[in-house]
Image (tube, rainbow, N blue to C red):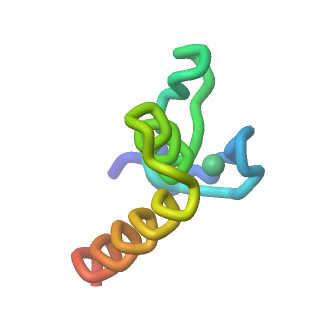
């Protein structure tokens, strides 16, 4: 069993605790951020607005929950 999967990390961008595999921030290519913020940065980089980013994240969360259940 991998212990890192149960480790809680704090995302420096949104300040929330997460325990999924971290994403690498596109801002400095060094900072590890939560998967949600990683998705936001990726969407932002292709010109997706904030409201649409949240909408897409909602869809991702629903899909993820469905798979894990
Ligand atoms: Zn975050």
Front position in the image: 42 or 62: 42
- Residue 44 drawn above or below residue 52: above
Number of on-image labels: 0
Q: How far from the left and from the top, in percent, is residue 6?
A: 51, 56
Q: Residue at x 44, y 39 (%)?
A: 47
Q: Quadrant of residue 13?
A: top right
Q: Residue at x 49, y 39 (%)?
A: 44
Q: Residue at x 49, y 28 (%)?
A: 24
- Residue 64 drawn above or below residue 39: below
Front position in the image: 9 or 1: 9
Q: How far from the left and from the top, in percent, is residue 41?
A: 51, 38
Q: How far from the left and from the top, in percent, is residue 25?
A: 54, 27
Looking at the image, the residue that sits furthest to the left is 67
Quick check: 19 left or right of 2? right
Quick check: 14 left or right of 53? right
Front position in the image: 32 or 4: 32
């Amino acid at each position: 069993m991998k212990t890192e999967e149960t480790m809680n990390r704090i995302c420096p961008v949104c300040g929330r605790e997460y325990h999924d595999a971290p994403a690498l921030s596109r801002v400095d290519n060094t900072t590890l951020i939560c998967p949600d913020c990683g998705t936001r940065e990726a969407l932002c980089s292709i010109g997706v607005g904030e409201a649409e980013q949240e909408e897409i994240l909602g869809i991702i969360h629903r899909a993820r929950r469905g798979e894990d259940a």
